Image (cartoon, rainbow, N blue to C red):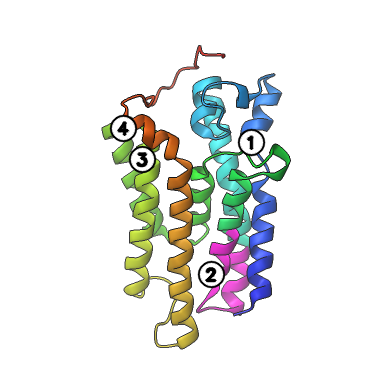
């Protein structure tokens, strides 16, 4: 497979990921979201600091900035490389998450990448995968009331589902074709990297969970303006 296309997809995804909806929406409301709540730029902190509308807007924005470029790459490469196109989608999605998590113009301090990771997964255009992971996320959050726990389970579940689907010929890979089989392995590696990055970005949440200090999901604005 073409290394140039991989690099281009990764770079294009990164540029799209630099659109930080948390910062944009916060500035429109006269609030620097980085200085309130957890200081994170993602949906959960926007929800806690600015309320449900902000959380929804930031979620949709962060999801679309990964989904749209992944969708475009999917459409283009599906016809050119029908047995390996998902690799280029995954590189694009990984780039978008890296752009969101590590924006160079904000000193590489961004969000945790769950909404963008969800957009990247949607960009694979596999409805069964999306349905399974959506149900998993909702069930975990409803049971635990922790978005962080739901996010971690979502990404672990994604890797499990991706591997299961790939091995059962439910994705584009044709294991009878050497190049496609290699692409499947590369896709699994990229999926593991995507999940590992998300879990790593939740290391502070994991620490708070272990200390029983993690904030549970709330649909009210935070009064904490420190």
Asked whether the beta carbons under mark 3 and mark 4 sit within 8 Å of each other, the answer is no
Find residue 148 and name its label: none
**Quarter holding residue 41:** top right
Q: How far apart are marks 3 and 4 (CA)?
A: 15 Å
Asked whether the beta carbons under mark 1 and mark 3 sit within 8 Å of each other, the answer is no
Name the mark nearer the viewer: 4 or 1.
Answer: 4
**In the displayed image of the protein, which residue is found farthest to the top?**
223
Residue 134 can be seen in this image: no
Q: Mark 3 points at which residue?
A: 150
Q: How crowded is mark 3: few (under 14 residues within 10 Å), some or many (20 or more)?
A: many
User: Is residue 211 placed above or below 91 in the rendered structure?
Assistant: above
Residue 25 can be seen in this image: yes
Find residue 87 and name its label: 2
Residue at screen point 49% across, 22% down: 48
Find residue 210 and name its label: 4
Q: In which quarter of the image is the C terminus?
A: top right
The boundaries of the magenta stretch are 73-92
Residue 106 percent coordinates (x, y): 69, 37
Q: Distance between the residues labelled 1 and 3?
A: 21 Å
On the rendered structure, is 212 left or right of 104? left
User: Is residue 63 placed above or below 191 in the rendered structure?
Assistant: above
């Amino acid at each position: 497979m073409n290394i140039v296309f991989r690099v281009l997809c990764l770079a294009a995804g990164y540029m799209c990921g630099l659109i930080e909806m948390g910062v944009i929406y916060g500035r429109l409301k006269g609030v620097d979201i980085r200085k309130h709540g957890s200081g994170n730029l993602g949906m959960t902190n926007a929800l806690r600091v600015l309320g449900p509308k902000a959380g929804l807007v930031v979620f949709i924005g962060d999801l679309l900035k990964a989904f749209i470029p992944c969708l475009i790459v999917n459409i283009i490469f599906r016809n050119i490389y029908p047995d390996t196109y998902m690799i280029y989608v995954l590189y694009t999605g990984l780039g978008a998450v890296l752009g969101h998590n590590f924006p160079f113009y904000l000193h590489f301090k961004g969000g945790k990448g769950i909404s963008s990771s969800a957009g990247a997964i949607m960009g694979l255009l596999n409805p069964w995968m999306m349905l399974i992971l959506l149900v998993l996320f909702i069930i975990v959050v409803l049971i635990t009331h922790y978005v962080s726990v739901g996010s971690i389970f979502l990404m672990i579940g994604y890797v499990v589902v991706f591997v299961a689907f790939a091995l059962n010929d439910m994705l584009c890979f044709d294991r009878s074709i050497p190049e496609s089989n290699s692409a499947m392995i590369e896709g699994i590696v990229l999926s593991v990297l995507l999940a590992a990055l998300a879990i790593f970005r939740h290391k502070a949440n994991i620490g708070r969970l272990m200390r029983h200090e993690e904030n549970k999901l709330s649909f009210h604005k935070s009064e904490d303006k420190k």
